[in-house]
Image: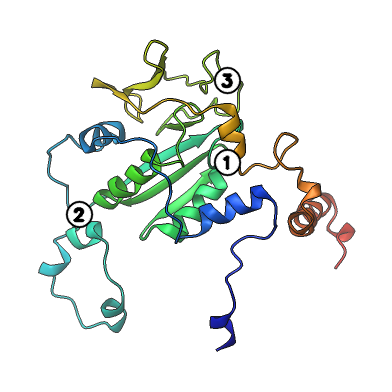
Amino acid sequence: MRWMAEKLNIYPGADRVAERRRTILDKNTKFRELREIPDEDLILLLGHRNPGERYTSVHPPLDELKEPADPIRELIEPTPGARGGDRIRYVQFTDSVYHSPVTPVFRGRMYHIRYRGVDTISYSGRELMEVRERDLELYTKELIETELFDPARTAIRGITVHGSAMRLDEDGLMFDARRRYMYDREKGLVIYTKNQMAIPIDKSIPVGSPRSDEELKSDSIIYGLDTVRCRDAEEVWEVTGKLMEANVKGGFNPGLVER
């Protein structure tokens, strides 16, 4: 069939920002691992259960349920969390406007492409993801340990997310009204002392060193004066420019939008 022979157009454009966006949205891409967070520390950061505690179930494991025959069920392999009957839990990331590795809207698109069984939504500068608990821990591990996370420009914030778009502090960290993390200047590491719900945890958890501005800009997916001007990316502007124009004009007077 013709559609099977054609290459999937994940994102338009030939510039480096468009290429970076394609990398993030391509489910076949393997992200670079920049740090290692022990499973126990990851569980503490999420704050849904204690390390070593069993997963809470909302229904019996699927293998124990006797359900009527369903051909769709035979086609779809359940995730480990769904198979175990895990409850739905969440993680929420906020991304700085100062060239964080990912932006909230692209997080949502990436979640749907790369992860199974997720429910996600963008709230201004943050992206919420809800999923079965053990699946959540697996997905979050990749989101924190790889190039998708920068300790200074990305943060885990379940509540009181405000401040992501404000200026960076003297150490290059995003403002956090709940002070969940701090920069250890002696060690050069960002350290969390509270979980995503801003509840103090029993141990300090290092999440690595911030990347340099040059590195962040080279991997940035944000069009701007210090990366790539959107108007200079002709193919991207052809698509996004028309959408922006229609949104602005149509918002004030739909009759102004050319059909």
Q: Where 2 falls versus 143 (above or below)?
A: below
Nearer mark to the viewer, of 2 and 3: 3
User: Which residue is at 79% across, 53% downward?
Assistant: 241
Labelled disc at residue 168:
3
**Marks 1 and 2, how far apart at CA:** 41 Å
- Please say if the residues under marks 3 and 1 sit with CB atoms less than 8 Å apart: no
User: Which residue is at 32% across, 28% downward?
Assistant: 195
Residue found at the very far bottom of the displayed protein: 1
Q: Mark 3 or mark 1, which has the lower sequence index?
A: 3
Which image quarter: residue 228? top right
**Marks 3 and 1, how far apart at CA:** 19 Å
Residue pointed to by mark 1: 219
Mark 3 belongs to which amino acid?
Leu
Q: Mark 2 or mark 3, which has the lower sequence index?
A: 2
Q: Nearer the viewer, residue 217 or 130?
A: 217
Q: Nearer the viewer, residue 98 or 94?
A: 98
Which image quarter: residue 145? top left
Q: Say whether residue 157 is left or right of residue 23.
A: left
- Residue 22: give x, y in percent of width and height: 57, 56
- Residue 15: give x, y in percent of width and height: 70, 51
Q: Mark 1 or mark 2, which has the lower sequence index?
A: 2
**Marks 2 and 3, how far apart at CA:** 42 Å
- Please say if the residues under marks 1 and 2 sit with CB atoms less than 8 Å apart: no
Q: Say whether residue 237 is left or right of residue 185.
A: right
- Residue 199 can be seen in this image: no
Badge 1 marks a residue whose secondary structure is loop
Mark 1 belongs to which amino acid?
Asp
Mark 2 belongs to which amino acid?
Val
Residue pointed to by mark 2: 58
Residue found at the very far top of the displayed protein: 186
User: Which residue is at 65% across, 47% downward?
Assistant: 17
Q: Say whether residue 10 is left or right of residue 42.
A: right
